[in-house]
Amino acid sequence: MPTLLLRHIAHLATFDDAAREITDGALYLRDHVIEAVGTDAELGARPADRVIDLSGHLVMPGMVNTHHHMYQNLTRVMVQDEPLFTWLSTLYPIWARLDDAAIHVSARVAMAELIASGCTTSSDHLYIRPNDVTLDSTIAAAQGIGLRFHAARGAMSRGQSQGGLPPDSCVEREADILKDAERLIHAHHDPARHAMTRIVLAPCSPFSVTPGLMREAAALARAHGVHLHTHLAEDLDEEVWCRDAYGMRPAAFAESVGWTGPDVWFAHAIFLDSNEIRRFAETGTGMTHCPSANMRCGQGIAKIREMLDAGMTCGLGVDGSASNDTSNLFLEARLAQLLQRVAPARYGSEAPGGRGGFGGTPGALSAREALTMATRGGAKLLGRDDIGHLAPGMSADVIAVKLDQLGLSGTQRDPLAAMVMCGPFRVSHSVIHGRPIIADGAFCDLDLDALLAEHAATMARIWQ
């Protein structure tokens, strides 16, 4: 099995159980697994098939993106100033034009963007399936580029004629959804440790599927040992809709259809009260924070500090490329930190003295906590014990950032915090499953110019 030695690492942040940060560190990788972590004095003399000198670099585990809609990079910067339900209603008919070729190229572009900005594992919530669109094409894209991938089989079954938000042309029959979900599990889901491909069942949202589909998806997922994912408590319009349709808040609806537990994670979860947060923490139910998209759509601030203090598992997601318009987990970590610091005290109490405005808390979320959400938090949401930190026996998913660059100058006192508080920047090296994907700032095997040309041609075809 091939071996790879990363040595003379200026600052090695392991995110292991002891939260070790090592100066002049080294990593020894054998095939797709980390064999040893330590100082260069301890590991530097080991023979290896390939050696990479990372002097002047910060090295950390690859980040884990736990919410995305990759196809949306075909519709970036659209519907710029509207609330969520208007945004969705405008874009649904446009997305109805997509075909499988468009899904494939948009996934490749999204994955390249993620990898270049430090992500090594991603989920993708593909919930609209018009024409000949399949989840298989996104899985093929991940396999081609080398990204560790959790493909979420999304679905919408409740169209406007049934009181839902999406047009009827964008929904599927529930029997077909469940049949295809089971096919995908049998064809692609790998439960083994260090797996590169797993399947997630992910009905889109409370306002686009029926309670019956939510229950049946949960039963199917648990019969096969796969995880569950959906949007929840994302918008106040959703809360009104759930009260009108079900007579309960979104969190209570989720619990009523069996959607709590360590195999469930929700995107956004902005509008949870303290009792709901406590209940999710008790059941092991997790959430993905998507600060850019929440700010872009003017939705609100998720109660991350309260969630973490309650013991709830929280990860980070870039969300769709039409509600975020970029795919960069370092930027999400930065915004997560800053947004918690300006969140109103108790998430809604006015500043004392009648001065107007709201008071924030400078230490509400640290840079290391934000990066832990992006690494270990995301790994736990996906049900993985093999990614998210660097230790012997863990998957060989490693990123390196060159510190000697303009946006990082002057950060020598705390280069790890700089990954959140400075930037933006691209990684100089990315190793996924032991395979170098980016080296010295360039993709090793991907023709990026050709990919971007194909993406532009696809946009011209879809939009004509």
Image: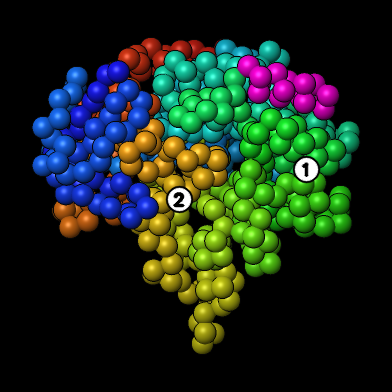
**In-image side of 257 versus 69 (left or right):** right
Q: Earlier in the sequence, mark 2 or mark 1?
A: 1
Give how far across and how far down residue 281 sits, in percent. Answer: 61, 59
**In-image side of 202 versus 140 (left or right):** right
**In-image side of 276 versus 386 (left or right):** right
Give how far across and how far down residue 216 sits, in percent. Answer: 80, 35
Is there any visible trace of residue 57 in the rendered image?
Answer: no
Is there any visible trace of residue 394 in the rendered image?
Answer: yes
Q: Do the residues labelled 2 and 1 touch (CB within 8 Å)?
A: no
Task: Point out which mark residue 207 bears.
Answer: 1
Is residue 109 shown above or below 200? above
The residue type indicated by label 1 comes to Phe
Q: Which residue occupies the foreground of this view, 276 or 195?
A: 195
In the structure shown, which secondary structural element does the residue marked by tag 2 occupy?
Answer: helix
Q: Which residue occupies the foreground of this view, 197 or 117?
A: 197
Is residue 380 shown above or below 410? above
Q: Can you tell which quarter of the image residue 230 is in?
A: top right
Asked if residue 178 is among those painted magenta in the image, a careful observer would answer yes
Tell me the magenta residue range.
173-187
Q: What residue appears at the point 48 percent right and 48 percent down from the top-left corner? A: 377
Which residue has dot 2 on it? 373
Give how far across and how far down residue 153 sits, in percent. Answer: 66, 28
Q: What residue appears at the point 59 percent right and 20 percent down from the top-left corner? A: 188
The residue type indicated by label 2 comes to Met
Q: Can you tell which quarter of the image residue 171 is in?
A: top right
